[in-house]
Image (spheres, grey):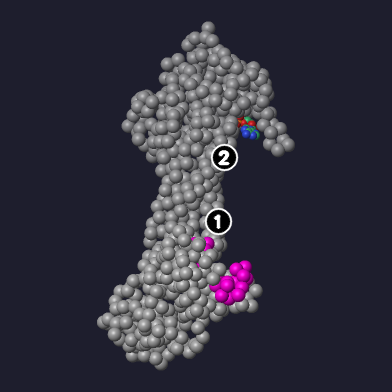
């Protein structure tokens, strides 16, 4: 059995808008092991992104504890959290979130800048990551000069360039056509194959089908947690 | 992320947003250039007056009728009273009574029209004695000055200032020619050299000198009163001694106390003081204008920095998500703001200096560059840029990354 990389215990998230309170997560208990490939599915507004942001240390839960690789995240300082995000987590966002003024390899090297690597090593690794996602010939292009699918592959390259243990993707294929979707999903599969833990939010059944485990959300709660045969076989 | 990296990413961010960077800098550029120019004008005007007074000579005392401390005005205003006489001048020139005085030149001036053929020129006609040339430390460009004999006999001779000579005689040497003043024909015997004052010489180079006796008959006056007595002290060291000797002598002669004097004595130093107190008003006014333009520039910088940070909150969120600590973000904006401010400051200084060099040739007004004002302006702009760039950036850096990423 593998050790858990993510342990969620009684996670609640309450959003306050004016005098209105809205409970987006109402007590989530879950645990995800290393090397798992998990798809989070569920209707719109069910709290998937909210959970993903907490798991990615981008947001704090209102209540509950979250342990990442055995460490309680809620006690960490801003600077420590930044380091955790930098070293352990790779993000892929639905909106790509690339900096428009920087070319592809400069976008990819950003996490390495904050990791404190020297410039020549950063460039080498960034170009290596772009080659892995099939964009070795687009390293000097700016995001505006790339297609949506290519931009998302740059974002994937940025997520994998630090070799993080955990890759979080919030609807990574939401803005892509079927061809680009397949490209990105193949990349995620490949990353999973090299031993990374993948958590992906999706609305598409075929995306969910690739994952070994499906977490189904409804109204801020997990209503179903199923492991496919493929996942069992992988263990 | 070390300082070198931060510096590089700062210059990149500035180049990536060229228009915005230019606008930010423009505020600083205008603010600094205007501070340099306005303060420079004030100081330039002050220096100009000081130069003119310096050109008078450092051991000169100027005795004028009327009391400068008297503001009641019943003795007549400064310079308009006629309490000084030729006898007073002669007494001051007496070595026994006033040992520290070297030379004395009484003057009596009035405005008159000079005519040569068809040409008319109105200027000050100054009646004086031969000592005037040395007391005022002037040179002759041509001819000679009048002699004591010519003063005694009231000879019909005149020495012209260089500008006056130029106005009246376009061609050839004026020496030996005739000038008509108040119906009387005077022979030009000499032309003064330029006074060498910083500007074109002004009234110092435009005057006509005649023997004081001739001057009296020209203006129709009969009394022995004089308008100003120029006194040259034996040396700069004995200037105050000479001052007291003259003051005592004249008080005795006029039968007044020194507190109640009907004359006043000015030295170069006291003239500089008076001029400076007048100029101070101008300087305060100009500095006020400069401060306002700097403030306006600063508000512009502040505004654009605020907008720029707000616009980049998403970028801050992304950088945080990828591992930037609040310190690193703060430092990045600090370097960006400082670079912008510095670039704008340097351009502003260059512009101001170019203006200070070019303007005087256009408007005949000297501009002195004040290092202090320049440095203060630069620091103010920098502080405004940094303050209003780094503060909101720091606040954005303290947002949770997701709030920053979500902001529009
Ligand atoms: N910052 C916020 N302030 C207030 N309410 C919020 C905020 N963020 C999310 N919510 C609310 O929380 C609920 C869950 O939102 P969340 O983004 O997690 O949904 P989701 O499952 O990701 O939906 P989708 O599939 O459409 O992306 C929604 O009802 C949303 O309105
Ligand atoms: Mg969502």
Q: CA distance from mark 2 to mark 1?
A: 25 Å
Mark 2 vs ligand 1: CB under 8 Å?
no
Q: Is residue A178 above or below residue B205?
A: above
Picture disc at residue B246: none
Q: Quadrant of residue B70?
A: bottom right
Seen as rendered, the residue at the extreme top is A1
Q: Residues within 10 Å of mark 1 (few under 14, many from 20)?
A: some
Residue B292's disc is 1
Residue under pointer 2 = B392
Residue A89 on image: x %, y %: 50, 22
Q: Is residue A131 visible?
A: no
- Residue A216: within the magenta? no
In front here: B299 or B383?
Answer: B383
Residues rendered magenta in the picture: B250-273
* Label 1 chain ID: B
First-in-chain label (2 vs 1)? 1
């Amino acid at each position: 059995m593998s050790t858990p990389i993510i342990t969620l215990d009684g996670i609640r998230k309450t959003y306050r808008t004016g005098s209105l309170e809205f409970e987006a997560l109402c007590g989530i208990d879950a645990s995800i092991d290393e090397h798992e490939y998990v798809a989070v599915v569920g209707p719109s507004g069910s709290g998937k992104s909210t959970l993903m942001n907490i798991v990615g240390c981008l947001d704090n839960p209102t209540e509950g504890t979250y342990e990442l690789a055995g460490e309680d995240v809620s006690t960490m300082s801003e600077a420590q959290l930044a380091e955790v995000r930098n070293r352990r987590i790779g993000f892929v966002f639905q909106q790509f979130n690339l900096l428009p003024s920087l070319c592809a390899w400069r976008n990819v090297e950003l996490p390495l800048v904050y990791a404190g690597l020297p410039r020549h090593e950063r460039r080498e690794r960034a170009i290596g990551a772009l080659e892995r996602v099939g964009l070795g010939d687009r390293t000097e292009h700016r995001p505006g000069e790339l297609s949506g699918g290519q931009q998302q592959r740059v974002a994937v390259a940025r997520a994998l360039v630090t070799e993080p243990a955990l890759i979080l993707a919030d609807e990574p294929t939401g803005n892509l056509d079927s061809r680009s979707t397949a490209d990105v999903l193949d990349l995620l599969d490949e990353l999973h194959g090299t031993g990374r833990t993948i958590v992906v939010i999706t609305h598409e059944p075929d995306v969910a089908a690739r994952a070994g485990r499906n977490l189904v959300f409804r109204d801020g709660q997990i209503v179903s947690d199923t492991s496919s045969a493929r996942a069992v076989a992988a263990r | 992320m070390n300082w070198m990296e931060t510096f590089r990413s700062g210059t990149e961010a500035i180049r990536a947003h060229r228009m915005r960077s230019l606008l930010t800098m423009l505020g600083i550029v205008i603010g600094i250039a205007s501070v340099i120019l306005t303060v420079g004008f004030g100081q330039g005007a002050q220096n100009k007056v000081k130069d003119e007074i310096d050109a008078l000579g450092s051991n000169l005392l100027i005795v004028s009728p009327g009391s400068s401390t008297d503001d009641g005005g019943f003795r007549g205003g400064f310079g308009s009273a006629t309490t000084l006489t030729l006898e007073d001048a002669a007494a001051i020139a007496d070595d026994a009574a006033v040992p520290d005085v070297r030379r004395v030149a009484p003057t009596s001036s009035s405005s008159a029209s000079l005519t040569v053929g068809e040409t008319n020129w109105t200027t000050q006609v100054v009646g004086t004695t031969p000592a005037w040339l040395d007391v005022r430390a002037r040179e002759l460009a041509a001819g000679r000055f009048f002699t004591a004999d010519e003063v005694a006999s009231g000879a019909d001779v005149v020495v012209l200032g260089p500008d006056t000579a130029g106005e009246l005689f376009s061609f050839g040497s004026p020496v030996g020619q005739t000038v008509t003043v108040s119906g009387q024909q005077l022979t030009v015997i000499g032309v003064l050299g330029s006074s060498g004052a910083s500007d074109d010489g002004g009234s110092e180079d435009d005057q006509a000198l005649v023997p004081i006796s001739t001057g009296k008959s020209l203006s129709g006056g009969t009394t022995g009163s004089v308008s100003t007595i120029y006194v040259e002290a034996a040396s700069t060291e004995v200037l105050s001694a000479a001052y007291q000797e003259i003051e005592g002598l004249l008080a005795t002669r006029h039968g007044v106390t020194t507190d109640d004097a009907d004359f006043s004595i000015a030295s170069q130093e006291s003239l500089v003081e008076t001029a400076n107190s007048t100029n101070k008003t101008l300087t305060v006014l100009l500095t006020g204008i400069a401060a306002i333009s700097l403030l306006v520039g600063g508000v512009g910088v502040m505004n654009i920095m605020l907008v720029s940070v707000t616009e980049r909150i998403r970028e801050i969120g992304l950088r945080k998500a990828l591992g930037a600590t609040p310190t690193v973000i703060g430092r990045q904006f600090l370097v960006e703001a400082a670079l912008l401010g510095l670039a704008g400051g340097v351009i502003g200084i260059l512009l101001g200096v170019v203006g200070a060099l070019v303007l005087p040739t256009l408007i005949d007004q000297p501009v002195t560059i004040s290092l202090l004002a320049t440095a203060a302006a630069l620091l103010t702009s920098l502080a405004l840029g940094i303050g209003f760039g780094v503060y909101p950036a720091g606040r954005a850096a303290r947002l949770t990354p997701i709030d920053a990423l979500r902001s529009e």
